[in-house]
Amino acid sequence: MLVRYLMPILLFMLICSSSLHAAQKPAANEALAELETAKVVFDVRLADLDSLIFNLKLLDETWKGIAAQDVKPEMIVAFRGPTVKLLTSAELDEEALHLFRVLKKKGVRFEACGVAMRIFKVAPAGLTPEVKLVANVFNSLIGYQSKNYAMIVIN
């Protein structure tokens, strides 16, 4: 008889517990606590447009997540290797161009490696205007890390 009364109560508690758990948002990142600025350089080496678009979306989400914690994101994206072939206005589709523009408006800086441009025979004049050509992205990565930028590799 007791089971007859307890079973609906237990079932109700289980249903409420799982729905409350599913509705929870992730907590703010403790790693960003007490920071005023988060400095990061992304070392990007991708070979296809779909991967580039996916990662540009992820960079935007990362920027928003940092900014949501009242921390100023300072983000630099350094493209090297085969990725430089994707950075021309002729290769980028509307979605990719839109993502570059959105991120650029937020202050994200983009750099393309001149060495990779030469190796992969990409004409600098064809670069999308959101991306700045630099002589050698390795020098950029060294410089930014020396200035306390965290480095994240995206392959």
Image: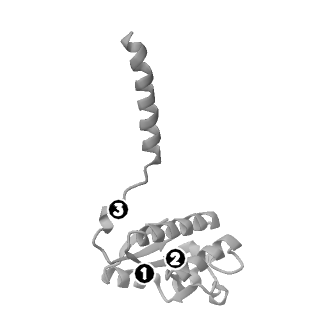
Instruction: Please provide percent x and percent y for residue 53.
Output: 60, 67
Q: Is residue 93 visible?
A: no
Say above or below: 26 vs 101.
above
- Among numbered discs 3 and 1, the one appearing first in the sequence: 3
Mark identifier at residue 95: none
Which residue is painted at 64% across and 67% down in the image?
49
Q: Is residue 112 visible?
A: yes
Q: Amino acid at mark 2?
A: Arg
Residue designated by label 2: 80
**In front: label 3 or label 1:** 3
Q: Amino acid at mark 1?
A: Phe
Instruction: Please provide percent x and percent y for residue 113.
Output: 52, 83
* Left or right: residue 88 compared with residue 21: right
Q: Nearer the viewer, residue 147 or 60?
A: 60
**In front: label 3 or label 2:** 3
Residue designated by label 1: 138
Q: Amino acid at mark 3?
A: Asn
Which residue is painted at 47% across and 40% down in the image?
19
Indicate the quadrant where residue 121 lies: bottom right
Which quarter of the image is occupied by the N terminus? top left
- Among numbered discs 3 and 2, the one appearing first in the sequence: 3
Instruction: Please provide percent x and percent y for residue 153.
Output: 43, 68
Which residue is painted at 46% across and 82% down in the image?
137
Residue designated by label 3: 29
Does the CB distance between marks 2 and 1 fall below 8 Å?
Answer: yes
Other-residue count near label 3 (Cα within 10 Å), few / some / many at <14 / 14–19 / ≥20: few
Q: Helix, strand or loop at disc 1?
A: helix
Other-residue count near label 2 (Cα within 10 Å), few / some / many at <14 / 14–19 / ≥20: many
- Among numbered discs 2 and 1, the one appearing first in the sequence: 2
